[in-house]
Image (cartoon, rainbow, N blue to C red):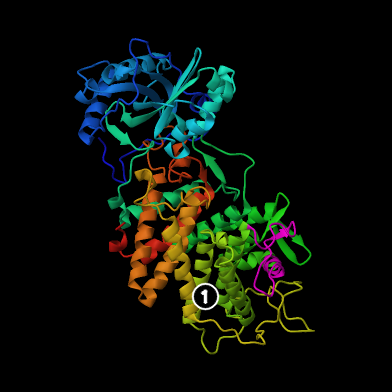
Amino acid sequence: MQGTGRRRGAWWPWWPGLVGLLAVICLVAGPGCKTKPPAKDQPLQDGVELPELSTKQADELGAWVASVYAGAGGEAPASLREGRGAAYVALRDHGKLLSEAWGPDGNLATSVSEALTKAKAAAPQGASPDMVELNLAHSFQTVAKPVKKELFRYASGKRTGIRGIELSFGDHFERTPPTKMLAAGERFGPVVKRFLEQAGVKHEEFVSGGGKARVFESQQFIVRLPSGEGVKLLRGNVYVEPREVTQANTQATVDLLIAWMFEHLHDDGRMTYLWLPSISAEKPKDNNMIRQWMATNALIKIAEKRDDPELWDRIAKNIDYNLEHFYKQEGEFGLIEYRGKVKLGAVSLAAMAIVTHPARARWQTQEHGLRRTISSLWAEDGSFACFYKPRGRAGRNGNVQNFYPGETLLLWAQLYRESRDPELLRRFVASFRYYAAWHLDPSDPDRRRPSFTPWHTQADYILWEALRDPPPADAGPEGEGETPAAEGDSAAGEAESGPQLTPEGWPVGTTPATPVEITEQELVDFVFEMNDWLIENMEVWEESAFDDEKGRFYSRKKDYGSPHASATGVYIEGIIDAYAMAKAVGDRKREDRYRKALSRAIRSVMQIQYVDDIDMYYVTDRQRTKGGLRTTVLRNEIRVDNVQHVLMGVLKVLDRFEPEDFKTD
């Protein structure tokens, strides 16, 4: 059996494009593999288990399957001869499903052999599959009364890709293996719904009419042809052992993430928003401005590492594309508008991308307009209105308050670091104190959410660094990094009638009437408070339902939202700053706690990354899929922020960790 090392051997890239897309959709996303009901003299009883195959047994299985497919046959391995269950076989060629079949219930050697024979006969003439997708179904459980609540207790979301399902009603019978569901990007709900539609009954009629439902466990394998190399899977993927989190493997993971970003940055500057590996295509008419501008900022972080003029030019084209399609000027205000909404977060992240690009002056008008919009949404108590359009949306206590103000403070921290503008510091500190109190408000404990933490951590870390590194005594109040005034800009420039103004509209060097007081320790304390709570409440390790979940951030105890690669990624972005802060102040206990959480999160990232032909067993366009991150271990779509957040966080980890820091214990 192929080992579980991060580099799992060669894979064979297939040509990009969507040739045969309709056929792929029908095969991959269609109903589960239909079979005739098991013969009455050969029932597969509930509860018959199949012992877990060892590495050696999986090697033997792969060699025998390849031999049977080639027509050579030979004695089946003892694990199959002695095992009982049912075998599902799918033949694939570079991800394309050629044919599929179930073998008879009972002896597994017979079931695998007959399934292979049927699948081979059903494959198109002249087909040459390069792999066999194999499920050994066992441990069937009957759902005594398959009402919705009971059925989906057995067929729950967390068991997607682990369990399969069998449904029968009258002459209708369908058995769907877990790898089939993973390939289609489906959960149990759509499988059940489709079966009921085909049977022509509603769920209540299915129950009252004697419908039967069973779930089953499945040992999953990929067998490469013609070599017979057997690869054991956990939920359609190779399990990444914690020991595989090393500096070298983390760098390899980042290299793949970067390659995916480059692959999806189009020639006209557009960035792919949502890629669907099941059909090897983008999801049309789906977009999000915050995530698009975060992707631009991720590209900038790559370019800063590489100092590549051509890459900077490609990023400039991306900024141009986004501004052309989504930027609007409304008087003195610059807006990022999409479907009638102007979000504070999108405005701030767009400004951040412009500010950090070397060709910043090229978009000076837009930068100033965006910064004025942000200033207009700020209140003297430190709070932000989160929407310019529509006004009043979500008020000042909606969930968006956990996101957009932190994203804005991250921009302001960067601007303060370059300008040392005392008025900007005053506003930042007012917002820091407002949102710290808001987040920790004891009268509303449900307000405290993990999504607040990474943005404020990153912003506070940058300000903390700036306070520790004061500017030279002879530095001007406007700072070296301040963008020059735009010609005709009403809120900037040296006007004859008054002083030079900042892009936000206040005089450069404005000194607050009351001195701003904030200490480094105040920032440190809040950062540690946030991140200690985050790890305590969201890190998944010993309590994971399945091993492939280990390292991600998610809570089953309280509803903070669904698990998501982008969430784990943005938490990495924040925790690595908390780690650097703990290391700098000599807090060894927290330094180690944060290091461990980061290493474990990297294990989760490696688990959900598309690496080779094994985890892309159902993907036809592997060039555009490779390196991307599934949304979760069971949801296979790749949203751009899945990649972007993780990339920005792990780049910082690689900068700050020593080789010996990459360990999960």
Amino acid type, callout 1: Leu
Q: Secondary structure at mark 1?
A: helix
Q: x, y percentage for residue 323?
A: 67, 56
Residue 135 lies in the magenta stretch? no
Residue 382 percent across, percent down from the top left: 64, 73
Q: Quadrant of the C terminus?
A: bottom left
Relative side of 127 to 631, left or right: left
* Relative side of 509 to 649, left or right: right
Residue 457 image point, x, y percent: 50, 67
Q: Quadrant of residue 483?
A: bottom right
Q: Main secondary structure of the magenta part?
A: loop
Give the residue drawn at x 73%, y 51%. 340
Residue drawn at x 49%, y 53% as measured from the top left: 567
Q: For this rendering, which residue is in front, 401 or 324?
A: 401
Residue at 76% across, 67% down: 332
Note whether 181 is above or below 357 in the view shown.
above
Q: Which segment is the magenta one?
A: 369-398
Q: Which residue is mark 1?
A: 463
Quadrant containing the N terminus in the rendered view:
top left
